[in-house]
Image: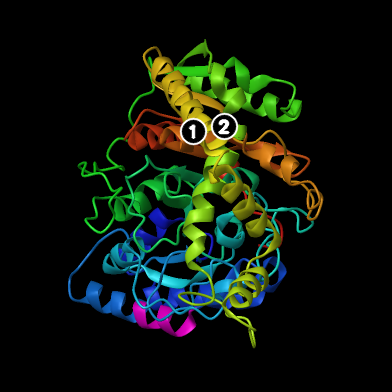
Amino acid sequence: MHQLTLAEIARGLADKSFSAEELTTTLLARINSLDPQLNSFITVTDELAVQQARAADARRAAGESGALLGAPIAHKDLFCTQGVRTSCASKMLDNFTAPYDATVVAKLAAAGMVTLGKTNMDEFAMGSANESSHYGAVKNPWNLEHVPGGSSGGSAAAVAARLTPVATGTDTGGSIRQPAALTSLTGLKPTYGRVSRWGMIAYASSLDQGGPMARTAEDCALLLQGMAGFDANDSTSIDEPVPDYSASLNASLQGLRIGIPKEYFGAGLDPRIAEQVQASIQELQKLGAVIKEISLPNMQHAIAAYYVIAPAEASSNLSRFDGVRFGYRCDNPKDLTDLYKRSRGEGFGVEVQRRIMVGAYALSAGYYDAYYLKAQKIRRLIKNDFMAAFEGVDLILGPTTPNLAWKLGAKGNDPVAAYLEDVYTITANLAGLPGLSMPAGFVDGLPVGVQLLAPYFQEARLLNVAHRYQQVTDWHTRAPNGF
């Protein structure tokens, strides 16, 4: 049963081939047996999962139906989950039990999904390798010596290893798409405001967006259906009708105009990844797509702008964790200043401290105009580039990452090298656009992902293209050895 996709699980539960409880206990056994190799879960909610599975079975017995009813899921450990530890993979929140459900968690629970547990991540979602967690690094199931990507690396590893069919992730600068690419998954970052951020512990409020992670585009469509929608509790939520994401999965790609930015194929891209991207372009051409070269001239400034804006917002958001109002408190402080300094110094990890310091500097008097304001102007230029490009093409395609998954610890002393791994993904966050990464091959046994970007609220088109591509390729069906 662990090899079944979400769509196959929905059919199996509807046909009574197995029960939600049988499926749940099978996956819990796999997690307890196999996850020590991966470290993909922070908390496994065995009792809650069995209770929810039995409730789902009872609802089906009473005549209720639904694609998500009784299906298992794991949540990234920054979605508040009532009565369950929600740690953000930080010592700062190690003892925090959420008193309420995030909107995403509540919506999926109402649909009947079964929560298997909370997945590991980079601390406060800050990282591209899932190595900054207080609970230790997550390992890539395709090669246990390599990173799974971040910050949603726990969710990615758990889905890739068939410990859960789907998982939630969050994407601030590529943190759904990049780990999806490095573990051979389909990961979707929706349009900013499409999925509620209420109850999702913030890193950078103008960039964060929750989304689905699964093996197939079909599964992402089913999960996004349950996640998306307006939420009055979230001031950034957009009141836009939610389409049926599964309805157009099989639509023809004939005449679809796909833009290929020339800036994507520079010196920083591994040529072996470039070959896989070109192969995927050829497959899409066979399906009827028309390829056009385009330009995104301001992409070269994206990393610099992002790593001013995101840390600036993080320094503001994380100021609440001070040992007084929220989070870890140091022992025996001498005075209030000592309480603040030691609580934050002991509670936050190195990468989080680094970004808070960068952000506080960028927002400080005398530097705000030189750094933060200029970064926001560049952000607007990047958005303008996309708007101009989408006047001539329907989608934009390119590599998701410039390199393959690197070895654990390889970039630990060079944060800038890790930041550069986000070069293709962060522009979508800066512009608020939807983006998807889909499996597109392997190099030396490590997965390669291809990224698709679309205009606002065109998630259905992204899922359609990925689904049609997955109908003629088998990269998404392959499983790591031992899992």
Q: Which residues are magenta?
A: 45-52
Residue 18 placement (x, y as % from top left): 39, 72
Residue at x 27% of width, y 51% of height: 235
Question: 69 left or right of 290?
Answer: left
Mark 1 nearby-residue class (10 Å; few <14, some 14–19, many ≥20): some
Q: For the residues marked 1 and 2, what is the alpha-carbon distance in whole angstroms?
A: 7 Å
Mark 2 nearby-residue class (10 Å; few <14, some 14–19, many ≥20): few
The label on residue 131 is: none
Q: Amino acid at mark 2?
A: Ala
Could one spot residue 4 in this view of the protein? no
Q: How many marks?
A: 2
Q: Please, what is the dominant secondary structure of the magenta stretch?
A: helix
Residue 116 placement (x, y as % from top left): 47, 72
Residue 425 placement (x, y as % from top left): 55, 36
Could one spot residue 21 in this view of the protein? yes
Q: Is residue 283 above or below residue 31?
A: above
Q: Is residue 36 above or below residue 277?
A: below
Residue at x 40% of width, y 81% of height: 83
The label on residue 373 is: 1
Verify CB contact (< 8 Å) between mark 1 and mark 2: yes
Residue 421, quarter of the rendered image: top right
Q: Looking at the picture, tell me which residue is in the foreground, 330 or 186.
A: 330
Q: Amino acid at mark 1?
A: Leu
Question: 102 left or right of 481?
Answer: left
Residue at x 48% of width, y 29% of height: 379
Residue 47 is covered by the magenta coloring:
yes
- The residue where tag 2 is placed is 370
At mark 2, the secondary structure is helix
Q: Looking at the picture, tell me which residue is in the foreground, 54 or 291.
A: 291
Residue 292 is covered by the magenta coloring:
no
Q: Looking at the picture, tell me which residue is in the foreground, 200 or 107.
A: 200
Q: Looking at the picture, tell me which residue is in the foreground, 446 or 388.
A: 388
